[in-house]
Amino acid sequence: MNHEAQSADKCIACSSCTVCCPVAEATREYVGPKMAGPVMDRFRRPGQQNDVTFEYCSNCKNCDITCPSGVSVSTLNMLAKNEYYKTHRHTVQDWLLSHIETLAKIASPIAALANLGRDNPLSALILEKLGVVTSMPMPKFASRTFLQEFKRLKQQSYPDKVVFFPGCFISYNAPQVGLDLVAVMQANRHEVIVPDSFKCCGSPLVVNGYMDDARKNAEHNLKELKKWTDQGYPIITCCTSCGLMIKQEYQELFEIPGNKEVAAKIYDAQEYLLELMDAGKLNTAFSPVEGRYLYHAPCHLRVQGMGRPAVELLRLVPKLEIVEANAGCCGLSGNYGFKTDKLPIA
Amino acid sequence: MRQYDVIVIGGGLAGLLAAAAARKSADKVLVLQKGVGAIAVGGGSIDVLGYGTDGRLLPGPQAGLAMLTAPEHPYSKIGACLVAEGLYFFSELTAKAGYPYGGSLSTRGWLVTALGTLKPSAFFPRSMDASALGTAPEIAVLGFNEMKDFYPELVVQGLKQRLGTNKKYRIIRIPSGLAAGRDVNSLDIARNLDHPANRQALALQLKRTLPAGTAIVLPPVLGTKPDYEALIQLEQETGCVFIEAAGLPPAVTGLRLQSLLINHLRDEGVEIMEQADVTGALVEDGVCRAVYTDNFDRRRTYGARAFVLATGGFYGGGLLAGIETVTEPIFHLPVRTAPRDEWGSESLLPEDGQPFAKTGIAVDASLRPVNAAGDIQLNNLYIAGRNLAGYDNCMEKSGNGVAVASGYYAGKLAGEVRA
């Protein structure tokens, strides 16, 4: 565990985090990040963890964004959750929503059947009983995984190569996003490598208190990523939560040798393209796109301290008008909004 | 390296004002902020100068500025004319945003605090204007049952001491309607009063017990957004005057100002980069070329023609106190302090201020950092806000006034720098 993350004593109790916490705004049942994080942290003893205030925290990280004193408030909550589940049992709901990769590996080969199996009234009843929301459309499993689709692609080879970490959502639910990234990189004279050895980044595991499972994934992923970064390949992510996890949360939660060196090579896809632009290498032969589009900046992007690279990039497209939503947290926070008890807050 | 015209380091009042001022003459302005700044910790009022160094109450902001003799004070460096220009810039900005601040430079305004004390100020939300306390025949102090941090008895006791016992004082306590869950603070109630129906219900309750014309002192709860909708509705429906007291953090009045400024900057196309922890600068031949942030992944570098350093004082992390010395962590600028054994005065609230409070970066008349000999340290770096040397905002009541004046001037100068 990284001791820098255990930063409760840096808190000066200014309450800025509680003001900006979207969960605290939505429900008065949550004591707020200041109390749940740094304040409660002083009363927690290993093995004697009984308070569950952290259950309200969705790990959206608005507290970290707000804190003027550099406290990783949300990480304190995640660490407390980990302590708690060392001596308490998880619910089936938690297991289901955090082990999406395991489920997807079973479901993907039979995606049509799995989607049907999940979307029928009987399954809905069972899922509701287990505390999983079914009134919202759940992302469907794609009939072919991203890796399967990717292997069919014929790429032009270029000396500039990047490794793509697709993450679970692109792998099993939205492979088209990954295929689009490959097309964009090809248009910018880059070849994309997608190893089949990556596992789930661990973000849904951490937020549901499966820290040991998350650590195993972190150790595995860092070992695999390091093989590429040692050879000088940049790593690209499209999912801001995967990017945040590998760059930052692995370092905050675990102490795995070589993490910092790997993190230094991980790029959000948009930021990577902006860097190409700065170097005069971005293919800017954009076709005009008529229309006004709303851009919503994910919290897990905002906390990374790189601004909103997508906005800068989209402004290069002729005729395209980009309006920033400035809507704050979307509320869903990965799987938080899919929990029946959290749906009203989300 | 990303290239900008002006980079402002710090997202507090001085930094945001600097960005707004710079944007008038520069296209690409970037604010790098770590955390949200302290606007919502303070109450959002712009106190310019309430008391002289001898502790004497000054006749008004402008007259006070004219009487200021300390050459090291930021106001003296900027000059009264430009201080006024900055304050008017701020005042106009609030008007354009639909949340016009009250007050002026020529007359002293008064605010009431949660302790029932009165505080001299210059510009403040209309809902904080306490002048009606002098004229209203009846004063009611409104508290919410479950809310900590605001005790009507304490406020009445304080007001009686200051305004005399001839007036009729009344205490009203009503349920907040928020009994369940965590402790109730002013922000919870303000969020409730964002809804017109809840305001109407409150107005009905007050109307039953209070005659029209009563001055009602209450915690800062009249909505979270930078507008006067809650104030106007309550005034119209009760015929009373509402006065929001300056209270403890989270200060809703400060929060409104923060939203107003951030909305303004976004409309103006100023980029605000969150969680950007500036740790150092690239300096060549007395000119700053770029600053860099250090994140969990890697260092990022941002270049500009001119920079504003508005990182705050001890509270904001712009100044770091060690055992023997005070340092400025980004540019390692010289910091002017009293000799070590004179940092603190034995009296807690000495009239001429605590010496440590005057610790900060010494500047020239253009707010550029200078050393003890007066040599300019960096030609294109301007200092604004609480990291400036030579003033004790706490004792003289200049909080936010120096931030606005120096933020405006620093931003204006930075925006005018050409390659």
Image: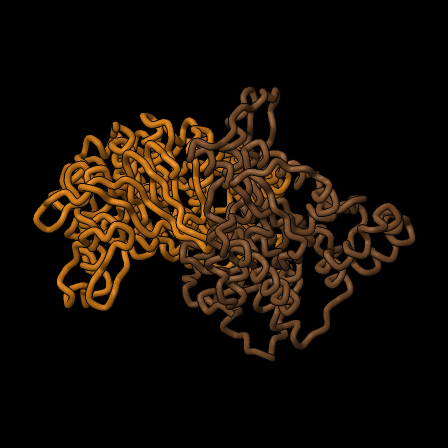
Chain colours: A brown, B orange
What residue sits 29% from the left and 51% below the top?
A: B330
Q: Is residue B246 visible?
A: no
Residue B411: quarter of image: top left
| Residue in view at x 30 percent, y 52 percent | B318
Front-lying residue, B147 or A324 = A324
The residue shown at (27%, 43%) is B384
For residue A256, above or below residue A116: below
Residue closest to the eye, A240 or B369: A240
Q: At x 82% / y 53%, what residue is drawn?
A: A107
In this view, the residue in front, A143 or B48, is: A143
Q: In the picture provided, is B129 more to the left or to the right than B71?
A: right
Q: Position of residue B376 (x, y in %)?
A: 14, 42
Residue B201, image x and y in percent?
A: 62, 42
Q: Residue furthest bottom?
A: A47
Residue B282 image position (x, y, % from top left): 28, 45
Position of residue A310 relative to residue B294, above or below, is above
The image position of residue A281, as x and y in percent, is 46, 32
Q: Residue furthest right?
A: A122
In this rendering, the count of numbered labels is 0
Q: Does residue B220 appear anywhere in the picture?
A: yes
